[in-house]
Image (cartoon, rainbow, N blue to C red):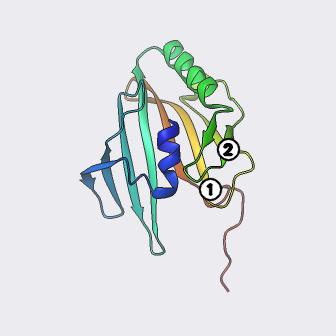
Amino acid sequence: MKKVIRDYPHHFAGLQGVVVEENPQSINYACKFEVSGAESSSITRYSSKDNNVFSWQALMLTTEDFEIAKKKFKAIYNALNNLSVKMDYGDTFYLTGKYESPVEEKKFTSVVLAFEKADRIIQRMKLEISLQYEMLEWKVRVLIYEKDREDDEQGETIE
């Protein structure tokens, strides 16, 4: 996972494989690097008027058993919370986030981790662990993406 995080400032260019799917507003690429335990992983480029935004995701588990998925979700959180990552440019940062215990009836749970005391290069990077019920199966994913602002934070106002 550290290798993927270190490639975030480079838009995952070192991990990007062949184009898998093209859509009007995004392009999905195969990921040349497999994270330990992942069933699959991919990189997505989203086009916007200002720039391109990239995200990476890995499917870590698919199961029909909620308890197995819940244990995997917690294990991934435990492995990634307080993870120290030394970036290519020498600075070390620690990922932190508050755990939320999955509840089967909710069908979706996610925990977002961010770097404590992040610099301007990685301050927008978020790592999300999600557990979601899709088409009769529970799926556990890890996503790394850029987030401009919090959902409750007001955006730019143009008069």
Q: In screen coordinates, is 38 left or right of 92? A: left
Q: In screen coordinates, is 136 left or right of 145? A: left
Q: Nearer the viewer, residue 107 or 147?
A: 147
Q: Residue at x 45, y 56 (%)?
A: 11
Q: Real-space Cα distance between discs 2 and 1? A: 13 Å
Residue that carries the numbered disc 1 in the rendered image: 124
Residue 51 placed where, x, y %? 46, 70
Q: Residue at x 67, y 74 (%)?
A: 156
User: Does label 2 or label 1 sit earlier along the sequence?
Assistant: 2
Residue that carries the numbered disc 2 in the rendered image: 93
Circles 2 and 1, Cβ within 8 Å, touching? The answer is no
Q: Nearer the viewer, residue 119 or 18?
A: 119
Q: Is residue 140 above or below residue 93?
A: above
Q: In screen coordinates, is 99 left or right of 56? A: right
Q: Is residue 68 above or below residue 80?
A: above
User: In the image, what residue type sits under mark 1?
Assistant: Arg
Residue 61 placed where, x, y %? 42, 24
Residue 108 placed where, x, y %? 55, 32
SS at circle 1: loop
Q: Is residue 50 above or below residue 8?
A: below
Q: Quadrant of the C terminus?
A: bottom right
Say if residue 102 shows up in the picture. no
Say if residue 99 shows up in the picture. yes
Pointer 1 local density, CA inside 10 Å: few below 14, some 14–19, many at least 20: some
Farthest-out residue, bottom: 159
Residue 104 placed where, x, y %? 57, 21
Q: Residue at x 65, y 82 (%)?
A: 158
How many labels, in total? 2
Q: Nearer the viewer, residue 91 or 136?
A: 91
Q: Nearer the viewer, mark 2 or mark 1?
A: 2
Q: Nearer the viewer, residue 4 or 72?
A: 4
SS at circle 2: strand
